[in-house]
Protein backbone atom coordinates (compact mmCIF):
# COMPACT_ATOMS: atom_id res chain seq x y z
CA UNK A 1 0.00 0.00 0.00
CA UNK A 2 1.37 3.41 -0.94
CA UNK A 3 1.96 5.71 2.01
CA UNK A 4 0.35 9.15 1.74
CA UNK A 5 2.35 11.82 3.51
CA UNK A 6 1.02 15.10 4.80
CA UNK A 7 2.36 18.29 3.24
CA UNK A 8 4.32 19.02 6.43
CA UNK A 9 5.95 15.57 6.37
CA UNK A 10 6.93 15.96 2.74
CA UNK A 11 8.42 19.42 3.25
CA UNK A 12 10.42 18.15 6.21
CA UNK A 13 11.78 15.32 4.09
CA UNK A 14 12.66 17.58 1.16
CA UNK A 15 14.47 20.03 3.44
CA UNK A 16 16.65 17.19 4.65
CA UNK A 17 17.32 15.75 1.18
CA UNK A 18 18.23 18.94 -0.72
CA UNK A 19 21.33 20.06 1.27
CA UNK A 20 22.67 16.51 1.26
CA UNK A 21 22.44 16.26 -2.54
CA UNK A 22 23.99 19.73 -2.92
CA UNK A 23 27.00 18.54 -0.92
CA UNK A 24 27.20 15.31 -3.01
CA UNK A 25 26.84 16.51 -6.63
CA UNK A 26 26.19 13.74 -9.13
CA UNK A 27 25.18 11.22 -6.49
CA UNK A 28 23.21 8.21 -7.73
CA UNK A 29 19.45 8.44 -7.25
CA UNK A 30 19.42 4.93 -5.78
CA UNK A 31 21.96 5.94 -3.13
CA UNK A 32 19.83 8.93 -2.12
CA UNK A 33 16.72 6.74 -2.00
CA UNK A 34 18.47 4.19 0.22
CA UNK A 35 19.83 6.85 2.57
CA UNK A 36 16.44 8.45 3.16
CA UNK A 37 14.50 5.16 3.01
CA UNK A 38 12.51 6.15 -0.08
CA UNK A 39 11.23 4.44 -3.18
CA UNK A 40 13.12 5.89 -6.21
CA UNK A 41 9.83 7.05 -7.71
CA UNK A 42 9.00 8.92 -4.48
CA UNK A 43 12.40 10.60 -4.60
CA UNK A 44 11.87 11.78 -8.17
CA UNK A 45 8.45 13.19 -7.21
CA UNK A 46 10.07 15.18 -4.42
CA UNK A 47 12.80 16.47 -6.72
CA UNK A 48 10.19 17.53 -9.26
CA UNK A 49 8.81 19.84 -6.58
CA UNK A 50 12.22 21.33 -5.75
CA UNK A 51 12.85 22.82 -9.19
CA UNK A 52 9.70 24.94 -8.80
CA UNK A 53 11.15 26.70 -5.75
CA UNK A 54 12.18 30.30 -6.35
CA UNK A 55 11.21 33.95 -6.10
CA UNK A 56 9.33 36.29 -8.46
CA UNK A 57 9.49 36.71 -11.43
CA UNK A 58 10.37 32.95 -11.46
CA UNK A 59 12.84 33.24 -14.32
CA UNK A 60 15.39 30.41 -14.68
CA UNK A 61 18.02 32.34 -12.70
CA UNK A 62 15.54 32.72 -9.81
CA UNK A 63 14.68 29.00 -9.52
CA UNK A 64 16.51 26.10 -7.91
CA UNK A 65 18.00 23.95 -10.67
CA UNK A 66 17.60 20.17 -10.48
CA UNK A 67 19.33 17.99 -13.09
CA UNK A 68 18.76 14.24 -13.37
CA UNK A 69 20.86 12.36 -15.94
CA UNK A 70 21.85 8.70 -16.26
CA UNK A 71 20.50 7.85 -12.82
CA UNK A 72 22.39 10.69 -11.10
CA UNK A 73 21.22 14.00 -9.66
CA UNK A 74 22.64 17.52 -9.25
CA UNK A 75 21.05 20.46 -7.43
CA UNK A 76 22.29 24.02 -7.93
CA UNK A 77 20.95 26.84 -5.81
CA UNK A 78 19.56 29.95 -7.52
CA UNK A 79 21.52 33.20 -7.48
CA UNK A 80 19.50 34.64 -4.60
CA UNK A 81 20.99 32.02 -2.26
CA UNK A 82 24.40 33.64 -2.68
CA UNK A 83 23.20 36.98 -1.32
CA UNK A 84 24.08 37.78 2.32
CA UNK A 85 21.26 36.79 4.65
CA UNK A 86 20.37 39.48 7.19
CA UNK A 87 18.28 38.33 10.12
CA UNK A 88 17.07 40.00 13.28
CA UNK A 89 18.04 38.20 16.52
CA UNK A 90 14.46 36.90 16.87
CA UNK A 91 14.48 35.57 13.29
CA UNK A 92 17.88 33.96 13.79
CA UNK A 93 16.82 32.24 16.99
CA UNK A 94 13.61 30.94 15.38
CA UNK A 95 15.57 29.68 12.37
CA UNK A 96 18.14 28.01 14.60
CA UNK A 97 15.53 26.25 16.73
CA UNK A 98 13.44 24.97 13.80
CA UNK A 99 16.43 23.91 11.68
CA UNK A 100 18.19 22.24 14.60
CA UNK A 101 15.15 20.03 15.08
CA UNK A 102 15.42 19.07 11.41
CA UNK A 103 18.75 17.37 12.14
CA UNK A 104 16.76 14.66 13.94
CA UNK A 105 15.09 13.60 10.66
CA UNK A 106 16.41 10.13 9.67
CA UNK A 107 19.00 10.37 6.87
CA UNK A 108 20.13 13.92 7.64
CA UNK A 109 23.92 14.32 7.69
CA UNK A 110 24.93 15.48 11.21
CA UNK A 111 28.12 16.98 9.76
CA UNK A 112 26.66 18.21 6.48
CA UNK A 113 26.04 21.76 5.20
CA UNK A 114 22.95 22.26 7.36
CA UNK A 115 24.85 21.41 10.54
CA UNK A 116 27.75 23.68 9.54
CA UNK A 117 25.39 26.56 8.77
CA UNK A 118 23.67 26.14 12.14
CA UNK A 119 27.02 26.25 13.93
CA UNK A 120 27.88 29.54 12.20
CA UNK A 121 24.45 30.90 13.13
CA UNK A 122 25.00 29.93 16.77
CA UNK A 123 28.32 31.75 16.82
CA UNK A 124 26.82 34.90 15.32
CA UNK A 125 23.92 34.89 17.80
CA UNK A 126 25.68 34.02 21.01
CA UNK A 127 29.40 33.58 20.52
CA UNK A 128 29.34 29.79 20.86
CA UNK A 129 27.00 26.81 21.02
CA UNK A 130 27.24 26.69 24.82
CA UNK A 131 25.62 30.13 25.04
CA UNK A 132 22.70 29.65 22.69
CA UNK A 133 19.76 27.28 22.27
CA UNK A 134 20.29 23.62 21.49
CA UNK A 135 17.44 21.43 20.27
CA UNK A 136 17.71 17.73 21.12
CA UNK A 137 14.73 15.56 20.22
CA UNK A 138 15.87 12.59 22.23
CA UNK A 139 17.32 9.25 21.25
CA UNK A 140 14.37 7.93 19.24
CA UNK A 141 15.27 5.00 17.00
CA UNK A 142 15.10 6.32 13.38
CA UNK A 143 13.53 3.04 12.22
CA UNK A 144 10.78 3.22 14.85
CA UNK A 145 10.25 6.94 14.21
CA UNK A 146 9.90 6.20 10.49
CA UNK A 147 7.49 3.34 11.17
CA UNK A 148 5.27 5.61 13.25
CA UNK A 149 5.17 8.22 10.48
CA UNK A 150 4.53 5.67 7.73
CA UNK A 151 1.70 3.95 9.58
CA UNK A 152 0.15 7.27 10.58
CA UNK A 153 0.13 8.29 6.91
CA UNK A 154 -1.22 4.91 5.78
CA UNK A 155 -3.74 4.72 8.67
CA UNK A 156 -2.57 1.24 9.60
CA UNK A 157 -2.10 -0.26 13.05
CA UNK A 158 1.16 -1.16 14.80
CA UNK A 159 1.95 -3.47 17.70
CA UNK A 160 4.50 -1.88 20.01
CA UNK A 161 6.52 -2.86 23.08
CA UNK A 162 6.38 0.21 25.30
CA UNK A 163 8.05 1.29 28.52
CA UNK A 164 5.90 3.56 30.68
CA UNK A 165 8.25 5.79 32.66
CA UNK A 166 5.57 6.99 35.07
CA UNK A 167 4.39 3.48 35.92
CA UNK A 168 7.78 1.77 35.54
CA UNK A 169 6.16 -0.97 33.47
CA UNK A 170 6.65 -2.70 30.11
CA UNK A 171 3.55 -3.43 28.03
CA UNK A 172 2.70 -4.68 24.57
CA UNK A 173 0.02 -2.58 22.88
CA UNK A 174 -1.82 -2.40 19.57
CA UNK A 175 -2.06 1.22 18.48
CA UNK A 176 -3.35 3.20 15.50
CA UNK A 177 -0.91 6.12 15.02
CA UNK A 178 -2.47 9.43 14.03
CA UNK A 179 0.34 11.98 14.19
CA UNK A 180 4.04 12.21 15.01
CA UNK A 181 4.99 15.48 16.70
CA UNK A 182 8.13 17.01 18.20
CA UNK A 183 7.47 18.70 21.49
CA UNK A 184 9.41 19.72 24.59
CA UNK A 185 12.60 18.02 23.45
CA UNK A 186 11.22 14.65 22.35
CA UNK A 187 9.29 12.89 19.58
CA UNK A 188 5.75 11.77 20.42
CA UNK A 189 3.13 9.75 18.56
CA UNK A 190 -0.56 10.47 19.08
CA UNK A 191 -2.54 7.26 18.65
CA UNK A 192 -5.59 5.26 19.53
CA UNK A 193 -4.56 2.53 21.99
CA UNK A 194 -6.59 -0.69 21.98
CA UNK A 195 -5.27 -1.65 25.44
CA UNK A 196 -6.56 1.57 26.99
CA UNK A 197 -9.53 1.80 24.58
CA UNK A 198 -8.78 5.50 24.29
CA UNK A 199 -6.45 8.09 22.79
CA UNK A 200 -2.94 8.03 24.20
CA UNK A 201 0.35 9.90 23.72
CA UNK A 202 3.51 7.79 23.46
CA UNK A 203 7.12 8.97 23.58
CA UNK A 204 8.88 7.43 20.59
CA UNK A 205 12.17 6.90 22.44
CA UNK A 206 10.30 4.64 24.90
CA UNK A 207 8.95 2.40 22.14
CA UNK A 208 11.30 -0.59 22.32
CA UNK A 209 9.95 -2.40 19.23
CA UNK A 210 7.36 -1.71 16.53
CA UNK A 211 5.66 -4.39 14.40
CA UNK A 212 3.38 -3.01 11.65
CA UNK A 213 0.31 -5.20 11.13
CA UNK A 214 -0.81 -3.83 7.77
CA UNK A 215 -4.37 -3.68 9.14
CA UNK A 216 -6.30 -0.50 8.37
CA UNK A 217 -7.64 1.29 11.43
CA UNK A 218 -11.29 2.22 11.77
CA UNK A 219 -10.59 4.83 14.46
CA UNK A 220 -10.73 8.41 13.25
CA UNK A 221 -7.91 10.71 14.25
CA UNK A 222 -8.64 13.02 17.16
CA UNK A 223 -8.16 16.78 16.68
CA UNK A 224 -4.55 17.92 17.21
CA UNK A 225 -3.73 18.78 20.81
CA UNK A 226 -1.76 21.93 21.63
CA UNK A 227 0.11 21.26 23.75
CA UNK A 228 -0.08 17.48 24.22
CA UNK A 229 0.51 17.21 27.95
CA UNK A 230 -0.50 15.14 30.94
CA UNK A 231 -4.09 15.96 31.91
CA UNK A 232 -4.85 14.79 35.46
CA UNK A 233 -8.18 13.17 36.17
CA UNK A 234 -10.40 14.18 39.04
CA UNK A 235 -9.51 10.94 40.84
CA UNK A 236 -5.73 11.35 40.50
CA UNK A 237 -4.05 11.43 43.94
CA UNK A 238 -2.78 14.74 45.30
CA UNK A 239 0.26 14.93 47.56
CA UNK A 240 1.13 18.08 49.50
CA UNK A 241 4.83 18.98 49.65
CA UNK A 242 6.87 21.65 51.38
CA UNK A 243 9.61 22.69 48.95
CA UNK A 244 12.83 24.55 49.68
CA UNK A 245 13.70 27.42 47.30
CA UNK A 246 16.07 25.03 45.47
CA UNK A 247 13.06 22.86 44.57
CA UNK A 248 10.82 25.65 43.27
CA UNK A 249 11.17 24.20 39.77
CA UNK A 250 8.66 21.48 40.69
CA UNK A 251 5.72 23.90 40.51
CA UNK A 252 6.88 25.08 37.06
CA UNK A 253 7.47 21.59 35.68
CA UNK A 254 4.63 19.39 36.92
CA UNK A 255 0.85 19.78 37.39
CA UNK A 256 0.36 21.41 40.80
CA UNK A 257 -2.56 22.86 42.70
CA UNK A 258 -2.83 25.27 45.63
CA UNK A 259 0.63 26.75 45.22
CA UNK A 260 1.60 28.83 48.27
CA UNK A 261 4.80 30.89 47.95
CA UNK A 262 6.41 32.07 51.18
CA UNK A 263 8.61 35.10 51.84
CA UNK A 264 11.80 33.02 52.05
CA UNK A 265 11.16 31.52 48.58
CA UNK A 266 9.95 28.15 49.85
CA UNK A 267 6.63 26.76 48.66
CA UNK A 268 3.80 24.50 49.72
CA UNK A 269 2.22 22.78 46.72
CA UNK A 270 -0.27 20.02 46.03
CA UNK A 271 1.29 17.83 43.32
CA UNK A 272 -0.96 15.78 41.05
CA UNK A 273 0.45 12.23 40.97
CA UNK A 274 0.12 10.17 37.78
CA UNK A 275 1.54 6.95 39.28
CA UNK A 276 3.44 5.72 42.33
CA UNK A 277 6.81 5.14 40.51
CA UNK A 278 6.68 8.75 39.27
CA UNK A 279 6.29 10.06 42.83
CA UNK A 280 9.10 7.79 44.03
CA UNK A 281 11.50 9.23 41.45
CA UNK A 282 10.48 12.80 42.27
CA UNK A 283 10.93 12.43 46.03
CA UNK A 284 14.30 10.70 45.67
CA UNK A 285 15.45 13.41 43.27
CA UNK A 286 14.37 16.19 45.63
CA UNK A 287 16.03 14.57 48.65
CA UNK A 288 16.28 16.93 51.65
CA UNK A 289 14.76 19.84 49.68
CA UNK A 290 11.22 18.44 49.99
CA UNK A 291 9.05 17.26 52.86
CA UNK A 292 5.80 15.34 52.48
CA UNK A 293 3.04 17.13 54.43
CA UNK A 294 -0.01 15.13 53.45
CA UNK A 295 -1.35 12.62 50.95
CA UNK A 296 -1.42 8.93 50.19
CA UNK A 297 -1.63 6.57 47.20
CA UNK A 298 -3.64 3.36 47.42
CA UNK A 299 -3.73 3.75 51.20
CA UNK A 300 0.06 4.11 51.55
CA UNK A 301 1.27 7.42 53.07
CA UNK A 302 3.31 9.43 50.58
CA UNK A 303 6.11 9.98 53.11
CA UNK A 304 6.56 6.23 53.39
CA UNK A 305 6.58 5.82 49.60
CA UNK A 306 9.60 8.10 49.24
CA UNK A 307 11.45 6.52 52.15
CA UNK A 308 10.84 2.98 50.85
CA UNK A 309 12.15 3.94 47.40
CA UNK A 310 15.32 5.43 48.95
CA UNK A 311 15.88 2.26 50.99
CA UNK A 312 15.52 0.05 47.89
CA UNK A 313 18.06 2.14 46.02
CA UNK A 314 20.50 2.07 48.96
CA UNK A 315 20.11 -1.71 49.23
CA UNK A 316 21.05 -2.13 45.55
CA UNK A 317 24.19 -0.07 46.03
CA UNK A 318 25.17 -2.09 49.08
CA UNK A 319 24.53 -5.31 47.18
Image: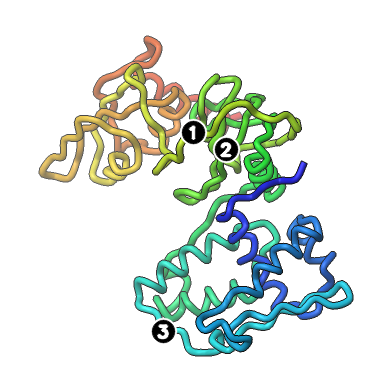
Marked residue nearer the N-terminal end (3 or 1):
3
Q: Nearer the viewer, residue 52 or 152?
A: 52
Residue 222 tag number: 1
Residue ID at (38%, 16%):
297
Q: Toward the viewer: 278 or 56? A: 56
In the rendered image, the quadrant that contains the C terminus is: top right
Callout 1: SS: loop
Residue, disc 3: 86
Callout 2 secondary element: strand
Does residue 109 show up?
no
Q: Which of marks 2 and 3 is in front?
A: 2
Q: Do the residues labelled 3 and 1 touch (CB within 8 Å)?
A: no
Which residue does the image show at 28% across and 39% down from the upper left? 251
Q: In this view, does 136 lie above or below 149?
A: below
Q: Would residue 289 be seen by someone viewing this image from the given angle?
A: yes
Seen in the picture, residue 184 relative to 206 is either above or below; the reply is below
Between residue 265 and residue 33, name the one nearer to us. Answer: 33
Give the side of residue 38 with respect to residue 114, left or right: right
Q: What is the number of the mark on residue 311?
A: none
Does 305 sit left or right of 269 as displayed? right
Q: What element carries label 3?
A: loop
Task: Give the crowd class for mark 3: few <14, some 14-19, many >=20 residues within 10 Å.
Answer: few
Tell me whether circle 1 and circle 2 mark residues in contact (CB < 8 Å).
yes
Q: Earlier in the sequence, mark 2 or mark 3?
A: 3
Q: Mark 2 points at which residue?
A: 178
Q: Earlier along the polypeptide chain: callout 1 or callout 2?
A: 2
Quadrant of residue 111 within the rendered picture = bottom right
Residue located farthest toward the right when viewing the structure as drawn? 70
Circle 2/circle 3 CB separation < 8 Å: no
Taking the spot 38% from the left edge, 13% from the top edge, the residue there is 300
Q: In this view, does 151 lie above or below 118?
A: above
Amino acid sequence: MAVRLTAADRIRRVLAIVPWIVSHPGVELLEVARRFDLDPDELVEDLNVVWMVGIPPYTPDALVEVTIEDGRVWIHYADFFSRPLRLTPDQGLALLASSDGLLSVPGTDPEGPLALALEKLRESLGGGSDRIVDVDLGSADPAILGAMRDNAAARTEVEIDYFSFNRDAHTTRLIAPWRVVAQEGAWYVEAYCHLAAAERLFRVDRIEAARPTGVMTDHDAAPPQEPATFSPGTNAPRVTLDLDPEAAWVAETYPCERIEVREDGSQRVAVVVSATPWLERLLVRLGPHAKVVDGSIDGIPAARIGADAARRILARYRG
